[in-house]
């Protein structure tokens, strides 16, 4: 039986070695001439300054988000909210004594520290009168529509006072949470 094997010469070829050596000589000369300590410190300095700029920008952004939220909330507290009233004139029943009492509640004395709850039978006009008086008084009245699911109360309260909830405005805090598995 005749077996044929391909023949390859594994002996080094002098011309290929010479060409390879010739090609890499300038690179090797350059690599030997470089001051690696200085190069590494330069890269470290560049990365450090980039990190400082990133952290400063991140802190500036978090501060801006906080300040804009505070400004929006303060503006809403000063001006109050203007709830939209969707009642037809034919369905509205005027109650002047209740309106006057609500105005007294919505414009308290300077040192008044009480909370008031408006309650009554379904369909008697509590929401309509409250919204109407809140629109009349305007300044300093925040109308919050209490949802049937109380888990959504925080979102409704935030919407009423024009507050934007951001879990973490800071990218650094998000990274910290992910790295250290914090759940708060």
Image: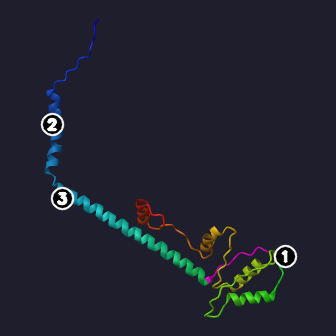
Q: Earlier in the sequence, mark 2 or mark 3?
A: 2
Q: x, y percentage for residue 9?
A: 19, 21
User: Distance from label 2 to label 3 (Cα)?
Assistant: 28 Å
Residue that extends furthest to the top in the rendered view of this protein: 1
The residue depicted at 61 percent of the width and 93 percent of the height is 111
Q: Is residue 7 magenta?
A: no
Q: Earlier in the sequence, mark 1 or mark 3?
A: 3
Image quadrant where residue 46 sits: bottom left
Q: Is residue 85 magenta?
A: yes
User: Distance from label 2 to label 1 (Cα)?
Assistant: 97 Å
Identify the secondary structure beneath mark 1.
loop
Q: x, y percentage for residue 82?
A: 68, 78
Q: Nearer the viewer, residue 118 or 125?
A: 118
The residue depicted at 68 percent of the width and 70 percent of the height is 147
In the drawing, what numbered circle is on residue 91?
A: 1
**Count of marks overlaid on the render:** 3
Q: Earlier in the sequence, mark 2 or mark 1?
A: 2
Q: x, y percentage for residue 66?
A: 48, 74
User: Distance from label 1 to label 3 (Cα)?
Assistant: 83 Å
Judging by the rendered image, the residue that carries numbered circle 2 is 22
Relative placement, left or right, of 173 versus 40 is right
- Dot 1 surroundings within 10 Å: few (below 14), some, or many (20 or more)? few
Identify the secondary structure beneath mark 3.
helix
In the drawing, what numbered circle is on residue 51?
A: none
Q: Is residue 35 above or below residue 9?
A: below
Identify the secondary structure beneath mark 2.
helix
Q: Is residue 133 above or below residue 158?
A: below
The answer to whether the residue labelled 2 contacts the one labelled 3, judged by CB atoms less than 8 Å apart, is no
Q: x, y percentage for residue 36?
A: 18, 54
Q: Main secondary structure of the magenta part?
A: loop
The span shown in magenta is 79-87
In the drawing, what numbered circle is on residue 38?
A: 3
């Amino acid at each position: 039986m005749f077996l044929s094997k391909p023949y390859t010469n594994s002996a080094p070829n002098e011309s290929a070695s010479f060409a390879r050596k010739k090609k890499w000589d300038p690179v090797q000369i350059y690599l030997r001439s470089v001051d690696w300590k200085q190069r590494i410190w330069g890269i470290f300095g560049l990365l450090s300054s980039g990190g400082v700029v990133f952290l400063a920008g991140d802190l500036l952004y978090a501060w801006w988000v906080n300040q804009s939220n505070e400004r929006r909330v303060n503006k809403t507290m000063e001006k109050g909210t203007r709830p939209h009233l969707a009642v037809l004139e034919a369905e509205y029943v005027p109650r002047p004594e209740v309106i006057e009492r609500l105005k007294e509640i919505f414009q308290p004395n300077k040192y008044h520290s009480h909370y008031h709850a408006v309650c009554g039978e379904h369909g008697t006009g509590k929401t309509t009168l409250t919204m109407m008086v809140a629109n009349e008084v305007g300044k300093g009245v925040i109308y919050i529509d209490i949802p049937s699911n109380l888990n959504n109360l925080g979102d409704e309260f935030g919407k009423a006072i024009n507050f934007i909830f951001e879990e973490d405005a800071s990218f650094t805090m998000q990274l910290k949470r992910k790295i250290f598995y914090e759940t708060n």
